[in-house]
Amino acid sequence: MMHHKISRRDMLKMMGAAGLASFAPIPNVSMLDLVNRMQDFRGSFTWWRVPPDTTLEQEQLDAFDAAVAQLMPNVTISYEVMGYGEMLDVLRTAVRGGGGPDVAVLPILWGVEFAAGGFLRPLSPADLGYTNEQFWPRALNSNLWEGEYYGVPTNNETMTFIWNKRLFEAAGLDPEVPPATWQDVVEFSNQITTNTGASGYGIVARQNHGNTPFRNMPLLWAYGASVLDETDEQPQYQEVRINSPEAAAALQVLYDIYVRDRSAPSSALDNSQAENRELFIAERVAMMIDHPTALRIITQNNPELAPFMGFTLFPSGPVRRAAVFGGSNIHIFNRANEDVLPAIKAFCQLRCNPEWANRLAWFSNPGNRDGFDNEWFQIRMEQIPFLDVATSMLEYGIPFPVIPESTEIMNLIIPSLLQNVLTERMTIADALAEAERAVQEVMAR
């Protein structure tokens, strides 16, 4: 059967339906040739992804799936969906057994581990028709291993500090004035618990869960502490700095909230953000760190609370205001078949273009910085209250160390440090010494 090449008129219709208006073509390849080439792709590949948090995000994901199916009708994509809390361990086991995905969008912290293990194909912006300048340098560098890129940013984000104005007012605090410093958080939290019986600040300290470092490393950085030298302008990731007076001062903040004042939930040691958010929804917690998506989730579960939610920048410490520079990157795994590699790269290119970088990160920010000039960014800004706060926090973002050991350090050692302090198994000094020993051991390994 003769394959019918797409006309320019049909291409423009497809661009409208598939969201290709800002699709960046591969250099020296016209848009028409590119779309026709995609129509010719054949084969199959697997894509691993986490499920969306909201129905709105699911709608955008469904639209993306439809666009890909229209552009590459002869390519079959198998989707593996699993939760954020389980994917890392499943992925580690799968790739070491010769399985796993062909392509995956992974949290910013994970990719370098798989690059160093030899499980990823090199992948740079140029491979997808983009330039390095279209992406945040910190985000792009999270994919850099031994001088080569192994992924491209899909979205970047920092979180926001959220408070319940109704609980503030009940506690005798000004409901329109959030804590400006981490010491304010300690004092506000105690006053809220004393006057209302609700917990003031929602600490998250679960072991082996990515929520824990994302909500506690900003406190350590704000006080001038770091695990290695990740806060330096040009980090080398050689020196272990966790055992410092600055780290001790930061941990004292958490100790005062959880142990001395008992103004955090007693379940904090087992809580991920999911449990913490449930307490906030029930108005048993007055302050927490979360994504802008929290507003929609909370509105769905407790509509009466939404008008009393405030979003602001993270509190400052004695040295700086800080947040984790987060987000996700798209990676191609070595197991991907060479024959279907052109289709996979076209898929990645579409996933990273300015339009879909917005639509598939609805409550985040586009990894492709051209996305900030895209009409979908303006639509999102109009529809998502407080997205501007999360966007403003990007300038305070600090990336986790870009080394294979980062996931173990951040997901295991940092939570253990917190738990040793908050359970009073160790003094702050002894807990920091133990963390230093553990980090040194991991780095030496």
Image (cartoon, rainbow, N blue to C red):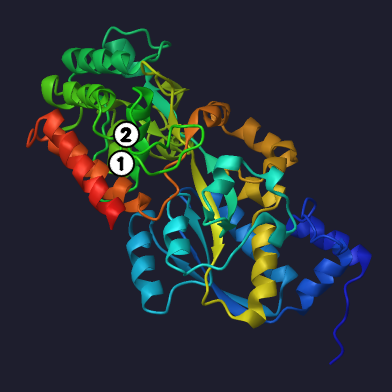
Q: Nearer the viewer, residue 290 or 149?
A: 149
Q: Secondary structure at mark 2?
A: helix
Is 174 positioned to the left or the right of 293 in the image?
left
- Disc 2 residue crowd, few under 14, some 14–19, many 20+, Cα 10 Å: many
Is residue 205 positioned above or below 200 on the image? below
**Residue 172 appears at what percent x and percent y?**
28, 7
Q: Nearer the viewer, residue 134 or 363?
A: 134
- Disc 1 residue crowd, few under 14, some 14–19, many 20+, Cα 10 Å: many
- Residue projecting furthest to the right: 8
- Residue that numbered label 1 is attached to: 212
Rendered residue at 39%/15% (across/down): 178
Is residue 89 positioned above or below 277 on the image? below
Which amino acid, by three-letter code, is at mark 1? Answer: Thr
Q: Quadrant of the C terminus?
A: bottom left
Q: Nearer the viewer, residue 248 or 289?
A: 248
Q: Quadrant of residue 30?
A: bottom right
Residue 340 visible from this viewpoint: yes
Rendered residue at 78%/50% (across/down): 22
**Residue 74 appears at what percent x and percent y?**
70, 80
**Label disc, if present, on residue 7 of the rendered structure:** none
Q: Nearer the viewer, residue 282 or 325?
A: 325
Is 378 positioned to the left or the right of 364 in the image?
right
Is 49 positioned to the left or the right of 167 in the image?
right
- Residue projecting furthest to the bottom: 1
For the residues labelled 1 and 2, say whether their Cβ atoms are less than 8 Å apart.
Answer: yes
Q: Secondary structure at mark 1?
A: helix
Which amino acid, by three-letter code, is at mark 2? Answer: Asn
Rendered residue at 83%/72% (across/down): 36
Is 220 positioned to the left or the right of 268 in the image?
right
- Residue that numbered label 2 is attached to: 216
**Residue 261 appears at what percent x and percent y?**
14, 19
Is residue 264 positioned above or below 337 on the image? above
